[in-house]
């Protein structure tokens, strides 16, 4: 009898070094690895020579396999091999559809282990020097999807905007204008925001401005790259925010 075990591993936000030690050990011992689009391919160099690596990533309008097909593949490989690793970007349970995979596997009698990963919602702002909370400025933060399954923005964005919390919006760059139009109904026009793309990677890029000037950032967005949007006064902690604010003031004085 084979072990019939699948391990869901969070690969972290992108930087190879930000995977957990436990997650890396699971990859090193795997017989099969099914990996996502936002996973560092450097991690695959740590598999055994005999390990089968299969790309099952989903990007906008480009899905290697449907979720139903991935679920079925996990079951099939679990019956054929001892240890199957499902390698997912960030954390498996933060907008990663990890719960769906766990429920499907368990319904087929397959043992599942989940190894948490460092979510980009936390790691990317931190890597840019933006704290999600700060005493007397922000007491909490919301992590929200920027695009629901039907392509709309989440209704939670309006609810979060009415609070004083920091907003961290994942998968929202394609709906950036819609999101900012909603935010400006509830937040002061000088509230700063940041768009961080390819977070923690060598080609990381950040755009910083205020809600009043959000249209100035539209042309700088690379819609082919993953990104997160951070909105709130904590964005002013970024080293370049004050510099850009001074440049705007100087520009207006001439």
Image (cartoon, rainbow, N blue to C red):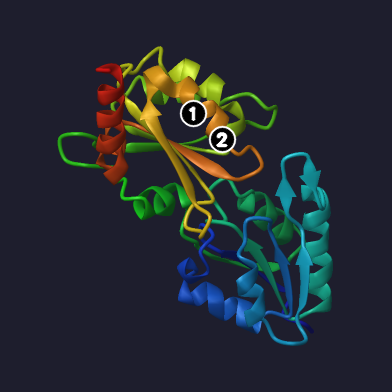
Tell me residue 182's x, y (percent). Answer: 47, 17
Q: Are marks 2 and 1 in contact (CB under 8 Å)?
A: yes
Give the class, few, some or many, for how many residues have Cα within 10 Å of label 1's Cα (few <14, many ≥20): some
Element marked by disc 2: loop
Q: Nearer the viewer, residue 125 or 29?
A: 125
Q: Nearer the viewer, residue 140 or 15?
A: 15
Q: Is residue 122 left or right of residue 190?
A: right
Q: Is residue 210 left or right of residue 173?
A: left
- At 31% from the left and 22% from the top, the residue drawn is 251
Q: Is residue 155 visible?
A: no
- At 45% from the left and 23% from the top, the residue drawn is 214
Residue receiving disc 1? 217
Residue receiving disc 2? 221
Q: CA gap, disc 2 to disc 1?
A: 7 Å
Q: Is residue 33 left or right of residue 185?
A: right
- At 21% from the left and 42% from the top, the residue drawn is 134
Tell me residue 43's x, y (percent). Answer: 61, 73
């Amino acid at each position: 009898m084979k072990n019939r075990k699948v391990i869901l591993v969070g690969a972290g936000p992108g930087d190879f070094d930000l995977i957990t030690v436990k997650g890396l050990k699971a990859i090193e011992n795997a017989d099969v690895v099914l990996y996502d689009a936002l996973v560092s391919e450097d991690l695959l160099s740590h598999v055994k020579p005999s390990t089968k690596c299969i790309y099952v990533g989903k990007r906008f309008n480009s899905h290697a396999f449907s979720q139903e097909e991935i679920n079925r593949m996990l079951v099939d490989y679990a019956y054929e091999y001892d240890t199957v690793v499902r390698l997912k970007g960030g954390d498996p349970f933060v907008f990663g559809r990890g719960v769906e995979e766990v429920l499907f596997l368990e319904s087929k009698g397959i043992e599942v282990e989940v190894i948490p990963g460092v979510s980009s919602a936390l790691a990317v702002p931190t890597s840019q020097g933006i704290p999600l909370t700060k005493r007397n400025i922000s007491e909490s933060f919301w992590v929200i999807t920027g695009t629901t399954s039907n392509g709309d923005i989440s209704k939670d964005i309006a609810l979060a905007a009415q609070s004083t919390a920091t907003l961290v919006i994942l998968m929202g760059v394609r709906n950036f204008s819609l999101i900012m139009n909603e935010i400006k109904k509830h937040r002061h026009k000088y509230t700063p925001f940041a768009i961080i793309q390819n977070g923690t990677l060598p080609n990381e890029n950040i755009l910083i401005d205020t809600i009043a000037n959000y249209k100035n950032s539209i042309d700088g967005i690379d819609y082919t790259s993953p990104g997160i949007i951070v909105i709130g006064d904590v964005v002013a902690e970024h080293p370049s925010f004050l510099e850009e604010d001074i440049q705007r003031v100087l520009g207006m004085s001439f």
